[in-house]
Structure formats: C-alpha cells, structure tokens
Image (cartoon, coloured by chain):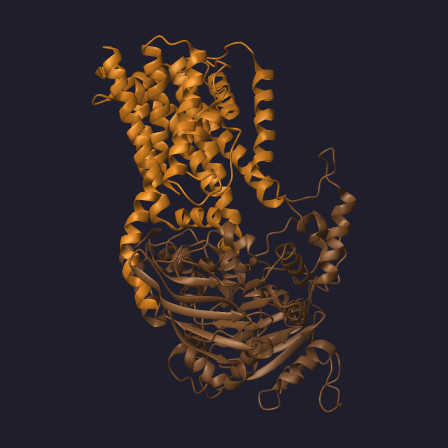
C-alpha cells in the first residue's frame, strides 16, 4: 500500500508546487501586464526617473506590509499601522524641530514608540486573550485620536540630514528603496532559516498544535507585533524625510493597503501560508497601478475603483488555481 | 458471487476504477441482502471508500455493472442513488449545534405552510415520527449541541433516513464513539435491520464486526480477498485476510524491564481530575483505561502542563517540576502524542520536514540559523527509524496516510529523547499494519528506558500492550490491574462501576501506584 502511494506522489507533488505558488506567478504576471499597459499608453511611464520613483513609493508601503505579513502569518492582523505612521510622523517632526542635534533622540524616540505600541498589542493579545482584530482596531482609534489631538495642522520640522535621506541615492537607487530591500532580504531569511521564522508559520498553521509542541506561542506573537509596529514607526520617519514636516494627513488608509499587499502576494488571512516575496509583488502591483493611473491622469476616485477590481481579479484567480 | 438469493438487493459486479494511473479497484464484486449487516473491512487504501463512493454516485466506475433492485446500471449518479434509497452516513458529523434535532433532520427540506413559511408543527411531528420509527430516544426540540456525540450521530442517521432508505452505508460510525456509546449505535443498526434495510458497515474494529455483522467482505489492494458468513471466520483468520500475512499475535512481545521511578504524581487535582496518584517507571508501559469523559485525556493534559494544576506535585526523577506550560513539560522531558493528530498533533498544511524538526530546531541551529544539512539528516533519520513512507519531505503532511501521519507525530517527539511519553489513542484510525509498527516502536522505546503512559479506548490494545493498567472513572483513578490479572471484563467493570464486584482487590477510590 505504501509503495503504491509513493510512486504517483512525485508528479502530484510537482503539480502541487505550481498550485501552491500560483499567487506569486499571478501577482508578478499582473505586474507585467500593468507595466506593458503603462509603456504602451504613455511615454512618461518607462523612464528611469518614473520607475525609480515607483520603487521608492513601493518602499513606503512595502516596509509596513512586511510587518503586516508577519502578523498575518501568525493568524493575526494589525489595523493600527496607519495611525501609528501618522503619530510617528508628528512625534519625530516635533522632537526634531529642524535641528540636526535633535535627530538621534527623535529617531530613537519614534522607533521606541513603535516598540511600545507593539509591546502593548502583544500584552493585550496574549495575556487578555483579546482577538488581534479588536485590539488593533482599538489602538487604531486611540493612536489616531492622540495624533489629531496633538495637531490638525502641519507641525515641527525635519532635520536637514533627514530631508536629504529621501533623495539620497546609492548608485541609481534611492535610499528608502535600499533600506526596504535590506529589510525584505533580512526578514525573508529570518522566516525561512531561523527558529523564530518556523515558529511564526507554526503558530499561524495551528496555534493549538504549536502550544502542544512546546513552542513559546506568546513570545512569537510579541515578536511579530513589535516588529510590525517598529516597521510602521520607521515608515513614519520615511514620511518625515519626504514631507520635511509633521503632516497629520499622512498614514490614512495604510492599514488596508498593507493588508491588500499581503493578500495580493498570496498570504492567507487565516495564517500559516504566505511569503514576503509575495508581499513585495503585492506592494509593487499596488504602487505601479497607482503610478500608471496618475501618469494617465485618471481621477483618483476611478483609481480606487480600479484597484478594487485588481484585488478581486487576483483573488478570484488564486481561488481558481487552488481548486 | 453468483449468489442471487431473492433478498439480494444490491450487486456490484467486477467494478474497476483507476485514479491518475493508480488502480484503486481491480474488478471488485460485492453484494448485500435486505435485512442483513454486511461488514466491509480492509486496511486504509484497500478501496472501501472508493467502492462506496461509486455506490453513492460520487465516482463513476471505469467498468463493471451495478444491479440494484433488479435493474442494471453501468453507473449511478448521486441523484439516482438518493432517489433509489441509497444512503451513506459519513464519519464526520455535519450538524448545526444551535438548531434543534428536528430542524437538523429537515434542514433544507423543511415542510412549508400555504404561505411559504416553515410549518413548525408539522416539522416537529414528522421528526417525532421518524425518531419513533428508528426507536431513537431523542427530544426533537433539544438543540443538537447539547447532545452527546453518540446522540448527535443518531440525529445524523435520522437525517439520512428521514427519506426512504433501502441500503445504508455506515463509514466507520464507531470511530467517534466511546465504548459505552457503542450499544446505542448497535441498537440503531439492529432496528434498521429489523425493518429490512441492508446495512453496509465499514469498520476497523473487529470486535464490532463479529458483534453485528452477518457477512463480511475483505478488500485488499483493490481486490476482494473473500466474502464469508461471519460464523465461518475466527478473529485470527479475518486479520490474516486483511493484512495478507499471519499476525500470530497482534502485539509484539516484550520483557518488561521496569527500572527506577521516573514520573511520580502526588495528589494532582485540576478542573477535571481529582487527587491523582501514580508512578511511572522507566521501561514500562502503563495503560490508562476508562470511558471517554472519565478524565484520561485531561490527566494527560495536566501532566503535560496544558491544564492548570490546582494542587498536587509532579516529580521527574525525584525532582519536583513546575508544569505551567507545555514548553516547560517539553524541557523537562515529557512528550504528549495527542488524541486527535489532525487538530492537535500536526500542522496539516506545513511540509513534513517542518513538522518533524519543529520540536528540535534549537538543536539544529548555529548562531540562530537553521543548518539545512543537519535538518535534512534529522528528517532522514526519522524516515528510517520509523519507516515513514513519503515521496518528499517538502510535501504537506495532510497528504500522508493516517499511519504515516502518526509516525510523523511520534518522530517529532522522539527527536527530543523524552523520558516520559504520553500516548493518547495512539492507533486511532490507523490500519492494522501500521498499528503493529507503532506497537513495536513502543516496545523499542521502553527497551531504551522510556516510560510510556498509553491512553486507549480499545480494550484489546490496553490488554495487549500494558504492563500495568490504571482505570479512571469520574476524574479519579479507581483501580490498578497487573497485566496477569487484567481481563476485558475487569477493566470494564472498574471503568463503569468504579470497583470490582467480588471484593477481591481494590476499593473504590484506590489510588494505587507503587507495587
């Protein structure tokens, strides 16, 4: 019986490989389609300047989406990232106040804020057993409230070095893009090759089995929520370097965009399945689409509509393939 | 198979079916008669389910024919099967817990009033009538979630039989039931038979086959090994037909090598178990018997740090250990192979590799990074030691057979070289061949000095494998039996009444451990 089962399994395994990787193939195929469409419809699309800009924008969305993906892989979700970006921009701008000498403290405090928020999430989720959706929905609202209590008008100022970071290039590539790529590679390695990474998939795959296997489930959850919030506050710093000022409109809607990027990249909302390279594809697809539509002068409400259509198309395609 | 006695209601002739090049059925002929129970047995993968799915119309056979109630079919559609009174009762329960018994029975086919609203009065009256006909003592207005599993299964059966049924296939109906709930199932089967229904009964438990079947057909590798009246067979002959080799003894022999006490439990009480005293010695297998719900699984969870201790101490090699989480138990050298491997033992959608090495990742890393070669070696070692049949370590565990899945769970723990292994229903849903391998493995482990606590609902397994037997009832250990003095009757007596009637050995509440 065992020998009979073993023989056809190899071809089946190969078939399963394609099925399982269908989301990546589809998301990158869609990127190609959008890119070809952009190239054919506007001369301004396929230029170094434009593409490097798209990659820079991808870094903004992608950095948080990495954290969001880690959280989703454990079967959780973080709805607070947009509010945290908003608050981080304000805090860093106020503390920096245009002075280079304040930069170190401001950066440390902003990242510290991220760690603190993530820690509180971890605490509420693991100790009080409140579902992540509820915890982060609450902190989404609280952080949003704090930010807009501080100010509803632009406030503070970035240090000059901070401002230069946004346009800094290493080779042809912008600095934010490089930071993002380093994070992507490093976190991917963590996911694939370290104990922590394996535990993330295990917790999301089946939390009960993970606990009964002696895995420190709570520590793993603390880890992903802290990382996610830390990456959100880092993105707040990116935004400060871009705007040069603490603008309270930054960050709106990022929670849904990061979740969208993760889903487009094939990460299962139930946890246990997905990858950061998929999320890269999701983030690229989103920023590329936005870029093409801007280049073509499409009005922004229509942009929303088209992005929604892309999400549904992609997800419908995955479902077809995984049948 | 040329037997065409007048009450033969169904005859399947020379049925063949292949899937992607694998011949699942190679010309199987099978017939059953009205008012009889026909058992269908065989190892996992023998073709039982495929054959029954062809009967239900879920699969179309490649060749062969089906003669049902005198009509000849080359294949059935699901609609034809249903319309002609063929019913299949699957192992899993598909009921809505917050709806009443009657609502579940008529789900999707509720009687309507003239206005198109649900005719509640008729709904309950009809449900009542069905339950009465089937002799099921159920309250039609009770929410299904409040019923025991055995009674929920009755509802499932009633649902299947609420329309006319002539042939009923029961696919391992006993797998989810505890010992004392079996009687309920048997009485339902008996009442069906009295009404002239043909019952096809699939089971791994041979006791049941001998208890209720009139005839038995053994399948192996997609072929019929034989069909016999049950009186013509002995248990040993039936096993031999199933596995194709003689298992003189279904249990491997081993000399108990009882060593020093490893695990000592003193007065442990949790929400579900009370005042537990027991001692496990190195190299022994202690069987933990008792009815489902007697606290066996809860005791295992407590010893594994999964449930909170209210009082009592646990010593490992003489030292008191704190067990407030499974992680601590694992570190202390305790392993738990849980009762339901699909929801508690395995990550079904993760690769086999990740499942095997998850508990020992800390030993496979350098500077926090997993060493691929070390991991591959570990997987390879597990594959060899436990003879796990897998095409690739990257395949997801869910695609393995039940026996191989259980081996993966075991290998996950063996890698940590635990001192104490708690096995909760180690061979549930596993075919006879794989069972024997797992028993052998248990013996090997005891030879290496591991102490094993084995929870099982199968009395033959408890009697065959245990060096000592502890019996639980209502959250307490009510008795201990040495291997020599244990019989099925004695274990059941303790499990159901809490004492042995001829007041020979133990008293109720006896918490014996040390000999």
Residue B316 visible: no
Query: What is chain A's hue in the picture?
Result: orange
Looking at the rendering, which quadrant does residue A297 occupy? top left
Residue B293, x across and y down, in percent: 67, 66
Q: Quadrant of the C terminus of chain B?
A: bottom right
Q: Looking at the image, which residue is at 44% across and 29% down?
A: A260
Give whichever of B17, A298 is nearer the camera.
B17
Q: Quadrant of the N terminus of chain B?
A: bottom left
Give whichever of B475, B190 is nearer the camera.
B190
Residue B511, x across and y down, in percent: 69, 79
Looking at the rendering, which quadrant does residue B27 occupy? bottom left
Give whichever of A201, A117 is nearer the camera.
A201
Residue A317 visible: yes
Q: Looking at the image, which residue is at 47% across and 69% down?
A: B430
Residue B226 higher or lower than B515, as above or below: above
Residue A198, x across and y down, in percent: 40, 50
B197 on left or right of B24: right
Residue B346 higher or lower than A54, as above or below: below
Residue B241, x across and y down, in percent: 42, 80
The single residue placed furthest to the right in the displayed view is: B121
Q: Looking at the image, which residue is at 42% across and 84% down?
A: B247
Residue A143 higher or lower than B467, as above or below: above
Looking at the rendering, which quadrant does residue A151 occupy? top right
Query: What is chain B's hue in the picture?
Result: brown
């Amino acid at each position: 019986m065992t020998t009979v089962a073993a023989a056809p399994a190899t071809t089946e395994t190969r078939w399963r490989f394609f099925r399982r990787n269908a989301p990546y193939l589809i998301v990158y195929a869609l990127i190609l389609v959008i890119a070809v469409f952009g190239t054919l419809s506007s001369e301004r699309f396929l230029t170094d300047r434009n593409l490097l800009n798209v990659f820079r924008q991808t870094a903004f969305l992608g950095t948080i989406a990495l954290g969001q993906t880690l959280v989703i892989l454990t079967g959780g979700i973080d709805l607070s990232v947009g509010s945290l970006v908003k608050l981080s921009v304000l805090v860093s701008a106020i503390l920096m106040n245009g002075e280079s000498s304040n930069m170190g403290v401001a950066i440390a405090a902003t990242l510290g804020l991220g760690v603190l928020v993530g820690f509180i999430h971890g605490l509420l989720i693991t100790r009080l057993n409140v579902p992540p959706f509820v915890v982060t929905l609450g902190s989404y609202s609280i952080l949003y409230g704090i930010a807009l209590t501080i100010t509803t008008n632009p406030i503070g100022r970035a240090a000059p070095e901070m401002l230069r970071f946004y346009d800094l290039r290493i080779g042809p590539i912008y600095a934010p893009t490089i930071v993002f790529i380093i994070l992507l590679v490093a976190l991917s390695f963590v996911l694939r090759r370290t104990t922590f990474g394996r535990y993330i998939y295990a917790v999301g795959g089946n939390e009960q089995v993970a606990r009964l296997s002696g895995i420190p489930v709570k520590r793993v959850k603390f880890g992903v929520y802290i990382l996610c919030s830390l990456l959100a506050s880092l993105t707040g710093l990116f935004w400060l370097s871009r705007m040069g000022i603490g603008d309270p409109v930054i960050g709106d809607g990022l929670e849904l965009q990061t979740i969208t990027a993760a889903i487009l990249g094939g990460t299962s909302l139930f946890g246990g399945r997905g990858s950061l390279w998929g999320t890269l594809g999701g983030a690229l697809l989103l920023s590329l689409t936005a870029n093409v539509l801007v280049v073509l002068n499409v009005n922004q409400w229509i942009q929303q509509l088209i992005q929604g259509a892309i999400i549904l198309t992609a997800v419908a395609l995955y479902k077809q393939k995984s049948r | 198979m040329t037997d065409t006695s007048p009450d033969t209601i169904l005859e399947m002739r020379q049925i063949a079916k292949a899937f992607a090049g694998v011949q699942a059925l190679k010309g199987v002929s099978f017939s059953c008669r009205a008012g009889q129970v026909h058992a269908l047995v065989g190892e996992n993968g023998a073709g039982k389910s495929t054959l029954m799915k062809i009967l239900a119309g879920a699969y179309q056979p490649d060749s062969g024919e089906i003669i049902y109630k005198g009509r000849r079919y080359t294949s059935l559609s699901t609609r034809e099967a249903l319309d002609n009174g063929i019913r299949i009762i699957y192992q899993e329960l598909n009921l809505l817990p917050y709806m009443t018994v009657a609502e579940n029975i008529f789900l999707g086919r509720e009687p309507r009033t003239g206005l198109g609203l649900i005719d509640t009065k008729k709904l309950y009256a009809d449900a009542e009538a069905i339950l009465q006909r089937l002799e099921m003592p159920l309250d039609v207005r009770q929410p299904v979630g409040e019923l025991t599993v055995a009674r929920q299964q009755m509802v499932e059966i009633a649902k299947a039989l609420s329309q006319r049924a002539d042939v009923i296939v029961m696919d391992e109906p006993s797998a989810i039931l505890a010992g004392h709930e079996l009687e309920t199932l048997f009485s339902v089967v008996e009442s069906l038979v009295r009404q002239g229904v043909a019952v096809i009964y699939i089971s791994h438990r041979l006791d049941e086959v001998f208890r209720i079947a009139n005839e038995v057909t053994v399948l192996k590798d997609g072929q019929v090994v034989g069909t016999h009246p049950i009186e013509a067979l002995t248990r040993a002959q039936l096993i031999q037909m199933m596995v194709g080799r003689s298992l003189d003894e279904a249990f491997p022999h081993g000399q108990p090598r009882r060593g020093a006490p490893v695990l000592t439990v003193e007065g442990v009480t949790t929400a579900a178990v009370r005042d537990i005293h027991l001692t496990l010695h190195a190299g022994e297998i202690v069987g933990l018997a008792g009815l489902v719900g007697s606290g066996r699984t809860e005791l295992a969870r407590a010893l594994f740090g999964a449930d909170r201790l209210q009082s009592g101490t646990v010593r490992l090699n003489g030292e008191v250990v704190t067990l407030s989480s499974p992680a601590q138990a694992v570190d202390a050298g305790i392993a738990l192979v849980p009762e339901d491997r699909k929801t508690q033992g395995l990550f079904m959608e993760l690769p086999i590799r990740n499942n095997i090495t998850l508990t020992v990742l800390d030993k496979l890393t350098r500077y926090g990074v997993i060493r691929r070669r070390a991991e591959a070696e570990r997987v390879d070692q597990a594959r060899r030691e436990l003879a796990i049949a897998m095409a690739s370590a990257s395949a997801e565990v869910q695609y393995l057979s039940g026996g191989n899945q259980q081996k993966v769970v075991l290998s996950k723990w063996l890698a940590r070289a635990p001192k104490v292994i708690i096995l909760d229903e180690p061979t549930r849903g596993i075919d006879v061949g794989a069972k024997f391998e797992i028993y052998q493995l248990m013996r090997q482990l005891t030879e290496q000095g591991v102490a094993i606590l084995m929870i099982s609902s199968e009395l033959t397994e408890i009697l065959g494998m245990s060096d000592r037997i502890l019996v639980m009832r209502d959250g307490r250990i009510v008795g201990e039996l040495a291997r020599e003095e244990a019989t099925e009757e004695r274990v059941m007596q303790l499990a159901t009444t809490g004492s042995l009637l001829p007041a020979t050995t133990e008293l109720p509440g006896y918490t014996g451990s040390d000999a």
